[in-house]
Amino acid sequence: MRTTVTLDEKLVKELVEFTNAKTKTAAVALAVKEHIRRAKLKKLADFLGTVAIDEWAIQEGNKAEMKRAKLLEEIGERNSR
């Protein structure tokens, strides 16, 4: 999508230098993506301590995943013979 924006030339030059981007467009796109990523992380951080985690369920899930991995490994070994 093409959008025209007016930006401070010094800021854009500094942004290009810091990001090592080849173009101004790439630098701005990277900055926008990074800003969105940080905003999402901040939103996630706000949930810390507010979600109850079922440790037992996590442990059981890990056990099931280990069983699955072992089974797949055995199947792979059988198929390679």
Image (cartoon, rainbow, N blue to C red):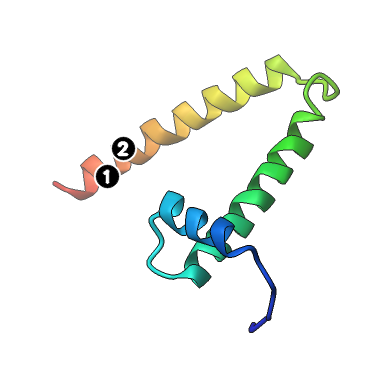
| Residue 31 figure quarter | bottom right
Farthest residue, direction top: 56
Q: Is mark 2 on a helix, strand or loop?
A: helix
| Residue 71 figure quarter | top left
Label 1: few (<14), some (14–19) or many (≥20) C-alpha neighbours in 10 Å: few
The disc at residue 73 is 2
Residue 10, percent across and down?
55, 58
45 lies left or right of 21: right
Query: Exactly how many numbered labels are in the figure?
Result: 2
Q: Do the residues labelled 1 and 2 touch (CB within 8 Å)?
A: yes
29 lies left or right of 73: right
| Residue 7 figure quarter | bottom right
Residue at 51 percent of width and 55 percent of height: 15
Residue at 86 percent of width and 23 percent of height: 50
Amino acid tagged 1: Gly
Amino acid tagged 2: Glu
Q: Give above or below for 34 relative to 46.
A: below
Q: Distance between the residues labelled 1 and 2?
A: 5 Å
Quadrant that contains the N terminus: bottom right
Residue 58, percent across and down?
65, 22
Residue 8, percent across and down?
63, 63
The disc at residue 76 is 1
Q: Which of 46 and 69 is in front in this view?
A: 46
Q: Is mark 1 on a helix, strand or loop?
A: helix
Residue at 27 percent of width and 44 percent of height: 76
